[in-house]
Amino acid sequence: MAPIPSHPAHPDDAPESYVGLDAEGAERLARSRGWSTVRALAPGSIITMEYLAGRLNFEVEDGTVTRCWHG
């Protein structure tokens, strides 16, 4: 039987800490905290639902992060 793949852990970081920050500053902060991929999305964007370890997603409206989640 094949081994179960292990996914690298994401940084120990609270997504809600990015809400209210400007998008550029939030991305710099996320990368400095160890996130390998940071994705900024407009509200209502169509996205795939696959989980990607190490990715942090921002929903950005008028240059401000309004929502944030892992994967």
Image: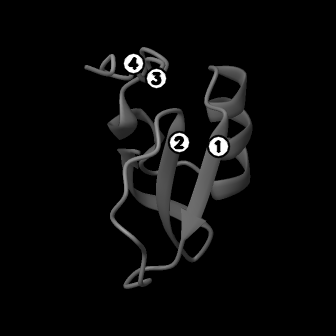
Q: Nearer the viewer, mark 4 or mark 3?
A: 4
Looking at the rendered structure, the kind of residue marked 4 is Ser
Tally the numbered discs.
4
Q: Which residue in the protein does label 4 denote?
A: 6
Q: Quadrant of the C terminus?
A: top left
Q: Mark 2 touching mark 1, by CB under 8 A?
A: yes
Question: What SS does tag 3 mark?
Answer: loop
Q: What whole-number distance in Å separates the C-alpha atoms at marks 2 and 1?
A: 5 Å
Q: CA distance from mark 4 to mark 1?
A: 18 Å
In which quarter of the view is residue 23 placed?
bottom right
Which residue does the numbered mark 1 point to in the structure image? 37
Mark 2: which amino acid? Answer: Arg
Mark 1, secondary structure of its residue: strand
Q: Which residue is mark 2?
A: 55
Q: Earlier along the polypeptide chain: callout 2 or callout 1?
A: 1
Asked whether disc 4 touches disc 3, contact meaning CB atoms under 8 Å apart, the reply is no
Asked whether 19 or 36 is in front, the reply is 36
Residue at mark 2 to residue at mark 4: CA–CA distance: 16 Å
Dots 3, 1 in contact, CB < 8 A: no
Q: Earlier in the sequence, mark 3 or mark 1?
A: 3
Q: Residue at x 49, y 57 (%)?
A: 58
Q: Quadrant of residue 35?
A: top right
Q: CA distance from mark 4 to mark 3?
A: 12 Å
Callout 1 amino acid: Thr
The residue to which callout 3 is attached is 10
Residue 12 image offset from top left, x and y in percent: 42, 14
Badge 4: residue crowd in 10 Å (few <14, some 14–19, many ≥20)? few
Q: Quadrant of residue 30?
A: top right
